[in-house]
Image (cartoon, rainbow, N blue to C red):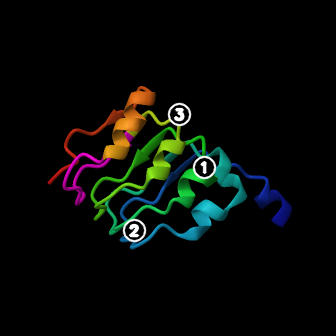
C-alpha cells in the first residue's frame, strides 16, 4: 500500500476553510506534489506562504489565497512560469507587490484586482 501511495500524483488540492495558520509541510514534501496544478487555501488564517510550495510544485497554474492574512508575497512565486490565476482578495496586502509585476509580465496571469484593503 505504501508504494501505491507514493506513486499518486496530485493535480488539485483544496484546503479551503480549515482555519489553518500555516500550510502543512506534507503539502510540499509529498512526492506527488510535483504534479500539482491548482492549490486552494481560501478562507484560512495564513500569514505567509512557504517558499517551498513554489519549488516543490513547479506546475502550479492556479493559486487561491483569498481571505487569509497574507501581507507579502515571496519572490519565489516568480518560479511559477505557468501561473495563470492568482487570487489574493481579502488579505493584508498594503500595496500591489512588486514581485507580481514580474509574474504578470512574463505570462498571461490574471491577478485579482481587489487584493488590497
| Vertical placement of residue 39 versus 45, above or below | above
Q: Is residue 28 above or below residue 63?
A: below
Whichever of labels 1 and 3 marks the residue nearer the N terminus, that label is 1
Residue in view at x 19 percent, y 55 percent: 94
* Pick the front one: 88 or 106: 106
Residue highlighted by disc 3: 82
* Residue 84 magenta: no
Instruction: State which quadrant residue 47 falls in.
Output: bottom left
Report the residue that reaches farthest toward the top: 108
Q: Which residue is mark 1?
A: 57
Towards the viewer: 85 or 44: 85
SS assignment at label 2: loop
Query: Can you say which quadrant of the picture contains the C terminus?
Result: bottom left
- Observer able to see residue 86: yes
Residue 87, given in percent of the width and then of the height, sits at 33, 45
- In the picture, measured across the screen, residue 104 lies left or right of residue 77, that is left
Q: Which residues are magenta?
A: 86-97
Residue 1 can be seen, yes or no: no
- Which badge, 2 or 3, comes first in the chain's sequence? 2
The residue identified by callout 2 is 18
Q: Position of residue 6 (x, y in %)?
A: 78, 59
**What secondary structure is marked by label 1?**
loop
Q: Which mark is residue 48?
A: none
Is residue 96 shown in magenta? yes
Q: CA distance from mark 1 to mark 3?
A: 11 Å
Amino acid at each position: 500500500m505504501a508504494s501505491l501511495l507514493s506513486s499518486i500524483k496530485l493535480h488539485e488540492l483544496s484546503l479551503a476553510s480549515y482555519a489553518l495558520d500555516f500550510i502543512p509541510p506534507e503539502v510540499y514534501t509529498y512526492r506527488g506534489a510535483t504534479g500539482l496544478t491548482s492549490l486552494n487555501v481560501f478562507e484560512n488564517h495564513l500569514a505567509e506562504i512557504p517558499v517551498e510550495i513554489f519549488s516543490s510544485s513547479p506546475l502550479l497554474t492556479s493559486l487561491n489565497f483569498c481571505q487569509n492574512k497574507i501581507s507579502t508575497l515571496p519572490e519565489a512565486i516568480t518560479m511559477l512560469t505557468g501561473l495563470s490565476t492568482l487570487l489574493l482578495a481579502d488579505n493584508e496586502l498594503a500595496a500591489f507587490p512588486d514581485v507580481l509585476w514580474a509574474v504578470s509580465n512574463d505570462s498571461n496571469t490574471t491577478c485579482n484586482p481587489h487584493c488590497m484593503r
